[in-house]
Amino acid sequence: MRPVLGFAGMTHLGLVSGISAAEKGFRVICFDPDLQRIAPLLKGVLPVSEPSLDELMAKNRASLSFTSNAADLQACDVVYVAPDVPTDDFGGSDLGPINNLLGRVLEASRDDTVIVVLSQVPPGFTRTKQREGRILYYQVETLIFGRAVERALQPERYIVGCADPRRPLPEPYRVFLAAHGCPVLPMRYESAELAKISINMCLVASVSVANTLAELCEHIGADWSEIVPALKLDRRIGPYSYLAPGLGIAGGNLERDLATVCSYADRYGTDAGVVRAWIANSHHRRDWVLGVLYRELLSKVDDPLIAVLGLAYKQDTNSVKNSPSIALLGHLKPFRVRVYDPVVPASVVPHPLIHDAMSELETCEGADVLVLMTPWSQFSGVDPREIAKSMHGKLVLDPYAVLKAAACRDAGLDYRTLGVSSFPGGC
């Protein structure tokens, strides 16, 4: 008989993980002490946006229970403690909510229930939460906003932090992990907690390389998109490298890990100079759109109308945590702005002159500039000729290269993107 699973914390991580576990054929009890989180879930309404998540919830509704009663966790053989850990503007984690939730789960569940901390926590956290006679593990989560369901259903591997990694995993926990058919890597708690940070450090390093050299391309006449295939064919770098330039690091999770490493470096006297350089590079690159706007439009045109496509911090999610678009709009409060995002309403932006459009082309109507701030795939289907007809001006800023550069220029648009010089021959 398959074990019954529990997921505590009905924010993005817990919801995606719980619904995906039901898709793997397990009975799942989804718990949150906040009835306001549970009530819409009982009606089938999800507070997060992820591809396929609504469909999976509807498909597996019979296997899913949503509750705010902690006593219901008595039925669970394994309980994942999986609330999103909030971060501040400096990447610092607020561990208060997960501490409280973990305490509730330990009190409410059976003594033989396996408790797994799934939320990201700093090294040393899980060991301090051990209780006599209880079974506690830490598991590294590697979900990605916009690809969370895919990552939950098809993990590359499981990294499991243990009090003693030499001992076999408890049977209910082992059965659930085995259902995903991937390697399981047991290690001590602190190694697993640091493994999550290590993964993100490698991602940040790749992003920083891409941003640094893409910016250089813009000045010397090189094209970063021509260089990327050569790097991905190098086995030391690989085909899945994060080499797309962007507007700095966003979303909160990577920033948290950078802040954690800097904090530990300060505490123990280790060197984190390269990490601080990544942070500085991220802050520098985030200003690309604002710099071009001021140079090419705001310093030349009175009362411009700015069209912005995208508010989410990345495509296929409704998260706006550290969104480059929201940050940009914070600098544009004196100017008229029209915005459109498929899932995020303009009401999330504290801007006195903002208008929420209903489509991409409505956003462009009469605009002096079009800025694509989130690379939603549906934006790529908009015909540049229609954009040109709708706009008053010709400037298009597309940092993520959502539109086809050649088609935009054929339509008479002044098209700018990261990593490509806006003039032949560069310097």
Image: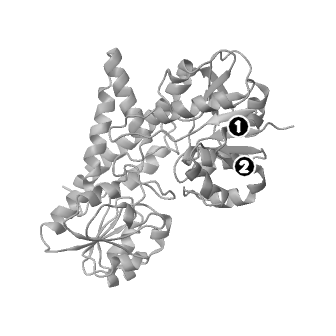
Question: Which of the two discs, 2 and 1, sits closer to the camera?
Answer: 1
Residue 79, by quadrant, is top right
| Residue 175 x, y percent position in the rendering | 78, 33
| Residue 384 x, y percent position in the rendering | 39, 77
Q: Which SS class for mark 2?
A: strand
- Compared with 361, 400 (above or below) is above
Name the amino acid, label 2.
Ser
| Residue 236 x, y percent position in the rendering | 49, 35
Q: Could you tell me if residue 187 is visible in this image?
A: yes
Q: Taking 101 as reference, is 134 left or right?
A: right
Residue 304, by quadrant, is bottom left
Q: Taking 181 as reference, is 204 left or right?
A: left
Residue at label 1? 71
The quadrant of the picture occupied by the N terminus is top right
Q: Residue at x 67, y 31 (%)?
A: 108
In front of the other: 330 or 367: 330
Q: Which SS class for mark 1?
A: helix
Gap between marks 2 and 1, in whole Å?
Answer: 13 Å
Q: How many marks?
A: 2
Name the amino acid, label 1.
Ala
Q: Could you tell me if residue 221 is visible in this image?
A: no
* Structural crowding at the residue carrying mark 2, measured as other residues with C-alpha within 10 Å and reported as few (<14), some (14–19) or many (≥20): some
Instruction: Identify the disc placed on residue 178.
Output: none
In front of the other: 155 or 322: 322
The quadrant of the picture occupied by the C terminus is bottom left
Q: Earlier in the sequence, mark 2 or mark 1?
A: 2
Residue at label 2? 65
For this orientation, the residue located farthest to the right is 1
